[in-house]
Image (cartoon, rainbow, N blue to C red):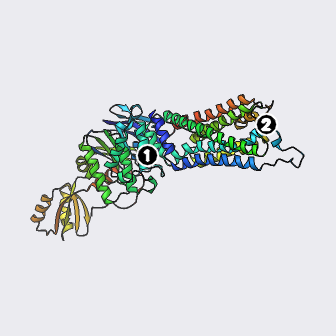
C-alpha cells in the first residue's frame, strides 16, 4: 500500500504541498485529481525522492522509496516523458536504467514490445513524436515489473488513439493486481479509468473516496422546470422550503423531488413545458469541490445550471 | 557494479560524448604534430636560442598538444554530468538509484577510467609522433635527462585531474555551458587575474598553477614543489567533487 503522511513541500515562500495525507488502495486505479498547480506533480516527485520534502513521508508498504533495494522493481513512475537524452536510442535508455536495478536485457526487449516500440528501439529518441516518448516513458515505468505505478498526466498531448491505449493499459495493470496512481486535471478522464479518487487543491487534501461517492457528495441533484407560470410555481415551491434559482420562464430547484413539483403544478392547473431531474456532471462536481482551491481563476461563471 | 555498468553504457551511448573523446585524440595529436613541425630552430629576435636546442624543452615541445587535451578533459568532465541535468535524464537516473552519492561516485569512476585510458593512449601517440618529427628535424628527444619520467607521468596525471575537477564543477553548476566556461577560464585567465590583483605569492595557491609544477624543469622556490603541487591540485579537484556530490544529494533533482 502507498501511504502519504503529513507531507509538506515548500519552494521558497510557495507551499506546494501542505500537510497532505492519503492512502492508495492496492489493485485498483486511483485518480489523483486537482486543478493545475494543486501540487500533484510535486507530490509524485517527492514520492520517488526526486524532491526532498520539508516534512512528512511517503511510503510503499511501509518503506520510504530510498530504502527500497531495487526501487524500480517495486515502483514504476512515469513523471515526464522528457527525461531522455535526444541522441541516445530507446533501447540504450532502457538498458542503462535496467542495469542499475539488475534487470535483464530480455526484459528490456519485452517492454519495448509491450509498448509497441520494438521497431524503433534502435532509433535516437530525439526523433520520437510526443506519443512515442510517452510510450517510452511507460516502458521505463514497467521495466522492473513493479507492483506500484505512478503516472503523472499520462495522456497529456496524446491523440485520441493514444489516450484510449493508455486508458486501457492502466485498467489492465490494475486487473493484474497492481496499484496505480494516476494524476490528472480532467475529471472526465478519471471517471473512465479510476475507481478511487484523491482530490487536492492548493496542496491540501479536499476529498478522498470512490468516484461515485465523490460525485454524490459533491453535487446532489436538482430539478429544471420550464413553465409559462414559472414565477408563480417558484413562489409556491419556495414557500414549501425549496431553493429556487429563477430564469427566463424557467427555474431550477433543489431540495424538492420532481414528482412533488409535477403534482403541485397539476393542483394549481399550471402548464409545464419541461420537468427534468438533473444530476451534476463530474466536471461540475469537481469545480464545486475545488472552488477556492484553484491556483488560477478564469473568472468565468459556473457552467451548467440556468 | 550495476550502476557503474549503467554509467559506462550512458557514456558510450551519446553521440556528443564520443565526439568529444575523438576530438581529444585528433586535436591533441594534431596540435602536437603541428607544433613540433613548425617551431623554428633559429634563434629568436631577442637573441634567445630556440627551445629546440635545449633537450629539456624538447620533451615539452613533443608533448605540447597534451596541454589542450588537459583542457578538453576538463570540458568533458563538465559535459558528462552537465548533459544529465540539461536533458533532465538525471531524474530518470535518480529515480532508479535514489542513493545519489552512489550514482555520483560511479560516474566519477567511469569518467576517471575512461580519461585515464584514453589520455594515456593519446599521450603515447602524441609523444611518439612529436619525438619522431623532432628527430627528423635533427633534434632527437633525450629520454635520459633528469625529470623525463616525471614529466611524462605528470602529463598523464594532470589530464585525469583536469577531468575530475571538471566533473566537480559540472555537479555544482548543473549545466554544461556555464561549467565549460568556468573550467576553461579558470586555468587560462582567472588564476592570472587573481595573481595580478593580489600579490604574486597567491600564485602558489592557485590550484591549476600548482598542478602544473609537476611539468616544470626546475622547482620554483616560491611555489609548491612538483608533487606537493600536484597533490594540492588533486585535493582541490576532489574537494569540488565532494561539494558537488553533497549538493546533488541535498537539492531537488
Residue B94 vs A242, above or below: the answer is above
Q: Position of residue B180 (x, y in %)?
A: 62, 46
* Badge 2 density bin: few <14, some 14–19, many ≥20, Cα 10 Å: some
Residue toward you, A236 or A167: A167
- Tell me what residue is drawn at x 22 percent, y 69 percent: A249
In the image, farthest residue toward the right: B47
Q: Position of residue B80 (x, y in %)?
A: 55, 43
Residue A242 vs B89, above or below: the answer is below
Residue toward you, A81 or B214: B214
Q: In this image, A269 relative to B39: left or right?
A: left
Q: In this image, B204 relative to A147: left or right?
A: right
- Tell me what residue is drawn at x 42 percent, y 33 percent: A66
* Badge 1 density bin: few <14, some 14–19, many ≥20, Cα 10 Å: many
**Chain ID for label 1?**
A
Count of marks, rendered view? 2
Depth-wise, is mark 1 or mark 2 nearer the camera?
2
| Residue where numbered disc 1 is placed | A93
Q: In this image, A292 relative to B43: left or right?
A: left
How far apart are the alpha carbons under marks 1 and 2?
Answer: 49 Å
Residue toward you, A156 or A102: A102
Tag on residue A131? Answer: none
| Residue where numbered disc 2 is placed | B56
Q: Secondary structure at mark 1?
A: helix
Amino acid at each position: 500500500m502507498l501511504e502519504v503522511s503529513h507531507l509538506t513541500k515548500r519552494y521558497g515562500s510557495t507551499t506546494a504541498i501542505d500537510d497532505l495525507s492519503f492512502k492508495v488502495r492496492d489493485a485498483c486505479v486511483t485518480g489523483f485529481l486537482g486543478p493545475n498547480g494543486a501540487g500533484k506533480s510535486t507530490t509524485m516527485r517527492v514520492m520517488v525522492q526526486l524532491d526532498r520534502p520539508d516534512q512528512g513521508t511517503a511510503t510503499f508498504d511501509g518503506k520510504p522509496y530510498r530504502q527500497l533495494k531495487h526501487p524500480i522493481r517495486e515502483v514504476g513512475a512515469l513523471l515526464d516523458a522528457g527525461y531522455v537524452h535526444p541522441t541516445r536510442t530507446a533501447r540504450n535508455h532502457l538498458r542503462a536504467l535496467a542495469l542499475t536495478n539488475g534487470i535483464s536485457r530480455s526484459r528490456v526487449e519485452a517492454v519495448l514490445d509491450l509498448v509497441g516500440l520494438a521497431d524503433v528501439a534502435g532509433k535516437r529518441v530525439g526523433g520520437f513524436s510526443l506519443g512515442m516518448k510517452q510510450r517510452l516513458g511507460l516502458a521505463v515505468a514497467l521495466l522492473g515489473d513493479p507492483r506500484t505505478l505512478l503516472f503523472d498526466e499520462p495522456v497529456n498531448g496524446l491523440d485520441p488513439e493514444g489516450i484510449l491505449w493508455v486508458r486501457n493499459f492502466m485498467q489492465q495493470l490494475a486487473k493484474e493486481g497492481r496499484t496505480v496512481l494516476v494524476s490528472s486535471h480532467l475529471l472526465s478522464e478519471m471517471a473512465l479509468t479510476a475507481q478511487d479518487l484523491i482530490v487536492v487543491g492548493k496542496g491540501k487534501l479536499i476529498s478522498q473516496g470512490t468516484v461515485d461517492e465523490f460525485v454524490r457528495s459533491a453535487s446532489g441533484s436538482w430539478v429544471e422546470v420550464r413553465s409559462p407560470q414559472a414565477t408563480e410555481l417558484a413562489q409556491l415551491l419556495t414557500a414549501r422550503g425549496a431553493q429556487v434559482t429563477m430564469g427566463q420562464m424557467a427555474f431550477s430547484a433543489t431540495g424538492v423531488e420532481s414528482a412533488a413539483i409535477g403534482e403541485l403544478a397539476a393542483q394549481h392547473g399550471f402548464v409545464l413545458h419541461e420537468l427534468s431531474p438533473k444530476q451534476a456532471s463530474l466536471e461540475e462536481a469537481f469545480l464545486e469541490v475545488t472552488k477556492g482551491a484553484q491556483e488560477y481563476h478564469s473568472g468565468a461563471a459556473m457552467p451548467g445550471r440556468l | 557494479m550495476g550502476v557503474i555498468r549503467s554509467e559506462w553504457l550512458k557514456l558510450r551511448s551519446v553521440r556528443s560524448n564520443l565526439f568529444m573523446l575523438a576530438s581529444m585524440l585528433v586535436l591533441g595529436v594534431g596540435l602536437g604534430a603541428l607544433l613540433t613541425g613548425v617551431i623554428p630552430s633559429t634563434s629568436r629576435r631577442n637573441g634567445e636560442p630556440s627551445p629546440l636546442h635545449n633537450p629539456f624543452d624538447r620533451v615539452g615541445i613533443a608533448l605540447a598538444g597534451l596541454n589542450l587535451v588537459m583542457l578538453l578533459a576538463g570540458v568533458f568532465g563538465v559535459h558528462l554530468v552537465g548533459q544529465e541535468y540539461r536533458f533532465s535524464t538525471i531524474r530518470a537516473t535518480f529515480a532508479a538509484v535514489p542513493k545519489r552519492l552512489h550514482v555520483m561516485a560511479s560516474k566519477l569512476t567511469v569518467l576517471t577510467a575512461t580519461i585515464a585510458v584514453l589520455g594515456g593512449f593519446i599521450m603515447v601517440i602524441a609523444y611518439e609522433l612529436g619525438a619522431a618529427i623532432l628527430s627528423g628535424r635533427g633534434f632527437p628527444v633525450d629520454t635520459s635527462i633528469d625529470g623525463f619520467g616525471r614529466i611524462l607521468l605528470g602529463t598523464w596525471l594532470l589530464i585525469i585531474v583536469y577531468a575530475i575537477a571538471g566533473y566537480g564543477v559540472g555537479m555544482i553548476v548543473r549545466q554544461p555551458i556555464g561549467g565549460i566556461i568556468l573550467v576553461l577560464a579558470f586555468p587560462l585567465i582567472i588564476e592570472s587575474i587573481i595573481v595580478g590583483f593580489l600579490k604574486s605569492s597567491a600564485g602558489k595557491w592557485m590550484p591549476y598553477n600548482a598542478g602544473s609544477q609537476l611539468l616544470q624543469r626546475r622547482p620554483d622556490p616560491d611555489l609548491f614543489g612538483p608533487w606537493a603541487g600536484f597533490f594540492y591540485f588533486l585535493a582541490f579537484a576532489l574537494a569540488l567533487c565532494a561539494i558537488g556530490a553533497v549538493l546533488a544529494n541535498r537539492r531537488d533533482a
